[in-house]
Amino acid sequence: MQQTSGRTLWIDYLRSFLTVLVVAHHSSLAYTTFASFDKAAYIRSTHPVVDTQRWIGLDIFENFNDVFFMSLMFLIAGLFVIKSIQRKGPGAFVRDRFYRLFIPFLIGGTILNLIAHYPSYMLAHGRLSLLAYVKDFFIVEQWPVGPPWFIWVLFVFNIIFAFIYMACRSKFGITKNTEPRSYQPASLVLCAFLLTFALYVPFAFWLGPYTWTGFGPFDFQVSRAALYFGYFLIGTWLGHVHFNETMFGPSAPLVRRWPLWLVACGLVYTLLTIASPYLTTLVKTGVFTEFQGYLIYFTIYVLSCIFSCIAFMTTFRALVKRHHRAWDSLSEHAYLIYLLHYPFVLWTQYALLDAPFSAFGKFLITLLVAFFGSWAVSIPLRKITWIAKYI
């Protein structure tokens, strides 16, 4: 069974899998070789807790996630937006998004982040005054946003699209299903490459690939804003053309080639990993200009993003055929796990600072504690009626 009560099973499972990747991503950041901690203002650190144990394998893992998984999360978030607006109406849709996204963002970005970042304050200042910590959190650190940044940005995207829908309502009528075979993989990959390149590369050159901006908790990666909104819009378009029966139908050429996309995903990311230091050397020795070096790197980066997104979507579409109790529970609680995992991550990493384990061992312990801890807390929370209604 693929679809039940308006939900699409493989998308639910893919979304929950990406949530696990998010937890693993944050669990790895204390142990990467590039990790650094700034005691003057830990907001400038690469991660709120940084260990002396490092492993380059976690650099590779962390960067693999960073290349694609937030783009894919925004795409998935857009898949059912049009249907939701059509079912509820624009006004009710916006009100629902306010309760489902904005209120949890305020709670996660304030209360949960205050709990999460206290170890960072102790590492930076060695003082245990809660009042001093709260003052530092809001004034010196300027209200660190942490993982909830995704939620407030998604809320804004939903509101913008609701206005687009109201202005162009006639364009969003019922579409006729298209024969799955009409979506040819080569054409889809080419279109995805051109669109992703246009949405990301110019902004990465202009603004820098790692630049964040914002005010207070409303922080976001400015160079990727267009990319994320573009992928959100791709998701709304896919939902409009009935993606589950057309482009991602079980007999569609894109889906039938899922092993090929997995291989391409691995090969292109391997190329990206190898090319990065090699291109740096070529730029330093004058073989390439800085612009040429970055252009080659960003081109491979875009390909890696595309092949990773296609690989995970087609693999889940091809292999997820029936319900599994554990996956169902994970899918049901994935949003709360996303909201709750960060305090578990940072406090576990803090507790392990002096533990005699390898970087990978600490990463694995952090991942297990954060994942199962946040999952365990999510289960009783979702039994509360008003939480279950929106989260």
Image: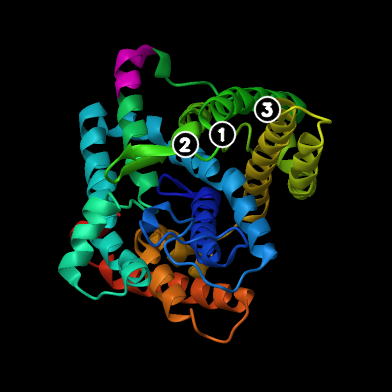
Q: CA distance from mark 1 to mark 2?
A: 9 Å
**Residue type at tag 1:** Phe
**Residue type at tag 3:** Phe
Q: Position of residue 348 (x, y in %)?
A: 43, 76
Q: Start and end of the magenta stretch?
A: 163-170
Q: Residue at x 28, y 56 (%)?
A: 108
Quarter of the image where one finds residue 279: top right
| Above or below for 335 versus 261 | below
Mark 3 highlights which residue? 193
Q: CA distance from mark 2 to mark 3?
A: 20 Å
Relative horizontal placement of residue 297, taking residue 390 as reference (left or right): right
Q: Which mark is residue 243?
A: 1
Label 1 with label 2: CB-CB less than 8 Å = yes
Mark 2 highlights which residue? 79
Q: Residue at x 74, y 49 (%)?
A: 273
Q: Find out whether residue 55 is within the magenta segment.
A: no
| Above or below for 27 versus 231 | below
Nearest the camera: 213 or 45? 45
